[in-house]
Image: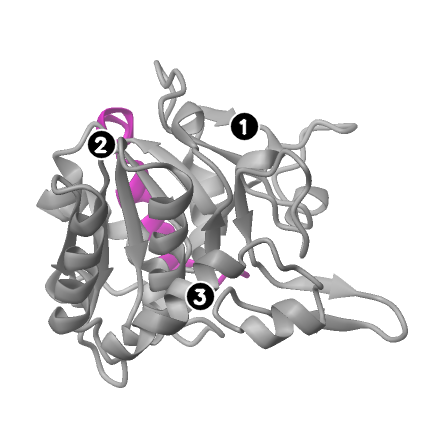
Amino acid sequence: MNILYCGDQGIKNGVLVSILSILMRSGKENEYHFYIATIDYKNTKPFQKSTVKFLDTLAKSYNCNNLVELIDATEVFVNDLPDKNMGSYFTPCSMLRLYINRMPEIASLKRVLYLDYDVIARGDFGDFYNTDMDDVEAAGVVDIYGKYFYHYRGLFNFDYINSGVMLFNMNECLKNNVFGRATQLCKKRKMMLADQAALNKVISKRKLMPRKYNEQADKPKNDTVLHHFSNNFKFWPYFRVQKIKPFEIDKIHSVLKITEYDDIFKEYEKLKENL
């Protein structure tokens, strides 16, 4: 399975937890190629080669055929900046997935699963990764909030995908210039959640998957396979945006009351200093 993360050195702890969860929950029989795309641009501190080397050794300890590879996307990004969205709340790295058509390591693959750094695998997601993608550009799960406001197709007919977990059929995406059109959109139009908005705008052939493959609520359901620790709106006793990430273990215990990931967190605590 080909797994892609995008970010700077600031996501290292989340990537460690995410990769650990995949290795520990999906079994040693699966083979994973993890790719981490990063940039060295202005105040952005790129993901470090030494960190990737450690993660690669860790992955190989579960299966000798596993791989963790760093992709320096600085040149392709700087040569075609998403000008209108460079001043957003998110770092420029959030838009790197829009440039994967220009990363030979990714463009040559048949399919790749993009994951945000705050996604934990709760079980084997092989059924999702191997889903039928004939004549489909991307597969994903509807965004639990955005579905009510964007790309709305009628009564309870939601198809606005959360981009934190997206499976790309690279052949179809390249054939239809999905990433090129999304990049151009980000150059010309300022948008909320620019990368997610652009992908939803240009992807015309999508496959909607069950929510269990991208559970965005703060607590997993019984059937959850991929748990995405995305921002959540809370209304009691006052309105607030709750932001808890997988490596904030004390908050996961005290606020979310989740303990089922403790075996993963135990390994994380032992390994995090190596990052």
Label 2 element class: helix
Amino acid carrying mark 3 in the image = Lys
Where is residue 246 drawn, in percent x and y? 51, 64
Residue drawn at (68%, 53%) of the image: 219
* Distance CA(mark 2)–CA(mark 1): 22 Å
**Residue at the bottom extreme, as displayed:** 43
10 Å crowding of disc 3: few (<14), some (14-19), many (20+) = few
- 158 over 50 or under it: above or below: above
Where is residue 111 drawn, in percent x and y? 26, 30
Give the label, 3 or 1, closer to the camera. 3
Magenta residue span = 170-192
**To which residue does mark 1 refer?**
209
* Distance CA(mark 3)–CA(mark 2): 41 Å
Where is residue 25 drawn, in percent x and y? 42, 42
For marks 3 and 2 on the same chain, the one whose residue lies earlier in the sequence: 2
Q: Is residue 57 left or right of residue 250?
A: left
Amino acid carrying mark 2 in the image = Leu
**To which residue does mark 3 refer?**
266
Residue 14 seen in the current view: no
Amino acid carrying mark 1 in the image = Met
* Distance CA(mark 3)–CA(mark 1): 31 Å
Quarter of the rendering occupied by the C terminus: bottom left
For marks 3 and 1 on the same chain, the one whose residue lies earlier in the sequence: 1
